Amino acid sequence: MARVKERLQVARQAVATFGKVVGKKPVSDIERDAAIQRFEYSFEATWKAAQLYLREMEGIEQASPKGVIRASYQVGVLDETKTEAALKMTDQRNLTVHTYNEALAQSIYARLEGYHQLMNQWLDAIETRLS
């Protein structure tokens, strides 16, 4: 359980830095791109924390973000609405490599505040189950 708590703490730190840059308006291109970068690493830290939780505490092995999201739903960490949102968030994360496309970058940025909330809720649910 100590490893899971440590991974959760890393994810919380990443999500906290992400939270400092979401929802600001207006934003420059540099601020927008920084927010998208923070989204990327926060997403990685969050799904990997969930992956370790599932492995260590639930005995479920999943290798991909979408597999971890679906397994989180199966064990009750995420409800159906959050699962659907998290799967969409994964698709958006996969598009971040193309943020040189101005319209795509703006579209992703517009969703970041909701993704920040979702990551916090996902981590909250895991922490609740650990306590």
Image: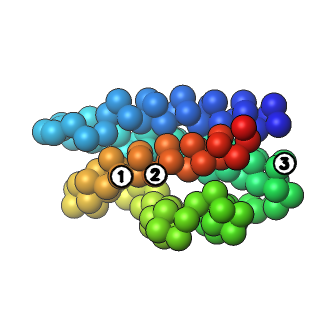
Specify the amino acid type for callout 2. Answer: Leu
5 left or right of 106 in image:
right
Residue at 31%, 55% in the rendered image:
111
User: In this image, 42 relative to 106: left or right?
Assistant: right
**SS of the residue under disc 2:** helix
Sequence-wise first label, 3 or 2:
3
Q: Quarter holding the C terminus?
A: top right
Picture quadrant where residue 64 is located: bottom right
Using the numbered discs, state the Cα–Cα distance from disc 1 to disc 2 in whole angstroms: 6 Å
Above or below — where is 22 with respect to 70? above
Quick one: label 2, few (<14), some, or many (20+) residues within 10 Å? Answer: some
What residue type is disc 3 on? Answer: Glu
Q: Which mark is residue 114?
A: 1
Q: Is residue 23 above or below residue 112?
A: above
Q: Which residue is mark 3?
A: 56
Mark 1 in CB contact with mark 3 (< 8 angstroms): no
**Which residue occupies 26% across, 59% down?**
107
Indicate the amino acid at tag 1: Gly
Q: Which mark is residue 118?
A: 2
Return the x and y of residue 129 as percentages of the image width and height. 70, 46
* As drawn, 57 above or below 17: below
Q: Is residue 104 visible?
A: yes
Total label count?
3
Q: Position of residue 17 (x, y in %)?
A: 44, 29
Visible residue check, residue 34:
no
SS under mark 1: helix
Q: CA distance from mark 1 to mark 3?
A: 28 Å
The CA distance from mark 3 to mark 2 is 22 Å
Front in this rendered view, residue 90 or 69: 69
Q: Are marks 1 and 2 in contact (CB under 8 Å)?
A: yes
